[in-house]
Amino acid sequence: MASSFCPKQALSFTNSAHQLHQSRAIPRDIHVRFPASVSSPSSRCGLKSKATTRLKVSATSATKVMDQSSSKASSQAPTVVEVDLGNRSYPIYIGAGLLDQPDLLQRHIHGKRVLVVTNTTVAPLYLDKTISALTDGNPNVTVESVILPDGEQFKNMETLMKVFDKAIKSRLDRRCTFVALGGGVIGDMCGYAAASYLRGVNFIQIPTTVMAQVDSSVGGKTGINHPLGKNMIGAFYQPQCVLIDTDTLNTLPDRELASGLAEVIKYGLIRDAEFFEWQEQNMPLLLARDPTAFTYAIKRSCENKAEVVSQDEKESGVRATLNLGHTFGHAVETGVGYGQWLHGEAVAAGTVMAVDMSRRLGWIDDSLVQRVQKILEQAKLPTSPPETMTVEMFKSIMAVDKKVADGKLRLILLNGSLGNCVFTGDYDQKALDETLRAFSKS
């Protein structure tokens, strides 16, 4: 049995993401109530839950995952999750066919000029539809677009300059809006461009990958990579809204879909045990792209992230826990070359390494290690880093990780039962060394 020891000087976060639930696995067919803004580890310190949404989950039937009056009504009325940041709060719209509802985007356009930032893969699929959503019945709005090359290897300053070139040549003013249409790379770069252009203009996120829909489009992290480290240059800059049209997942390659599931799994491990248990039962539906199951998974993921961001926008504490597996994973992405491994693939391998280290420290038991291994394999994700990674590569890249403080590498590790974690630099270095040696060459 894992020790309940919590290291000193660590930030400890318990599984309180859904305190209205009883501590039990979700049965095969029940009604579940949970807050629209899920309670976080500090919710017992005065945060109040918002209105609840009633959902029906099932391990067997897609039509039972959500309790709806009709599929038609569902596609017309988006689910809305609020990110509560005071006067910078914004909605996340989730649903099918949302790009066919122009009002959702147009209500967040404050000027007459829009720049859509997308890539060579997404543009042929959704650029025209997005332009129509921005301009239908709204002739005063003029839309420009810039189409960037697709891939993590292009998330750099050279590519970012193409966005600025287009904005300046188009003479866009401070009332313009940048729109990110694509996955995490496009969202990060467009957001950073919006934060920097004329010292800040409005922007909107339209994520088209699972990774972006459940994680990167929410919370305002923007930026680009540096050859020496991933996401080392950037800013916290919040969008006006996030519009998640789940129909865009229909064109997503299987590998990209699986990559995004790594972030979905993360939420269950660090703060939402019942969500993890639901995933264990429903992973086949997610891999089959069941639209109702995916809507539920996206919504629950966004609720978890929105609650964390609302409390810790700039990652001084609880938000850091959203980086479970990312320190090891970013080292993999940097070490093998950006774009060789997808972000979620690297995070999956990194999560296994973080879980292994947690076990070596005696903070979790073997059963949790086995459950993590099983669900990642079920999601068709890697559970070990590439063979080319060495211990020295891991150490040198992790040494410049953004979570290093005063020369000490801080990590997110599991502690105790499912849904509990710590963000700490106070751990036995021997455990880290043993994990690195177990998963990479000396």
Image (cartoon, helix red, strand yellow):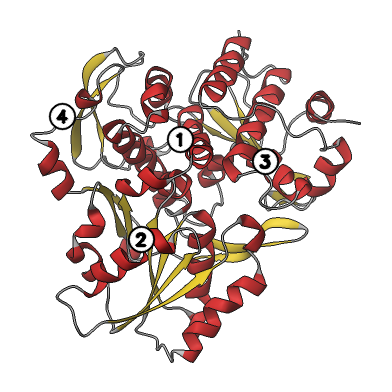
Residue at (23% x, 51% y) in the render: 97
Q: Where 187 falls versus 319 (above or below)?
A: below
Task: Classify 10 Å Cα crowding around label 4: few (below 14), some (14-19), many (20 and above).
Answer: some
Secondary element at image label 2: helix
Q: Where 230 falls versus 215 (above or below)?
A: below
Q: Distance between the residues labelled 1 and 3?
A: 16 Å
Query: 6 left or right of 203?
Result: right
Which residue has dot 1 on it? 264
Q: Give the position of the C terminus as an image quadrant.
A: top right
Image position, residue 395 (x, y; %): 83, 42
Which residue has dot 4 on it? 67
* Foreground tag (2 vs 4): 2
Secondary element at image label 4: loop
Determine contact: label 1, label 4, CB under 8 Å.
no
Image position, residue 212 (x, y; %): 45, 50
If you read the primary sequence from the N terminus, does the residue marked by circle 1 or circle 4 appear first? 4
If you read the primary sequence from the N terminus, does the residue marked by circle 1 or circle 3 appear first? 1
Task: Classify 10 Å Cα crowding around label 2: few (below 14), some (14-19), many (20 and above).
Answer: some
Which residue has dot 3 on it? 329
Residue at (83% x, 37% y) in the render: 388
**Residue 126 — which label?**
2
Type of the residue with mark 3: Gly
Q: Note whether residue 10 is visible.
A: no
Determine contact: label 2, label 4, CB under 8 Å.
no
Secondary element at image label 3: helix
Type of the residue with mark 1: Val
Which is nearer the eye, 91 or 20?
91
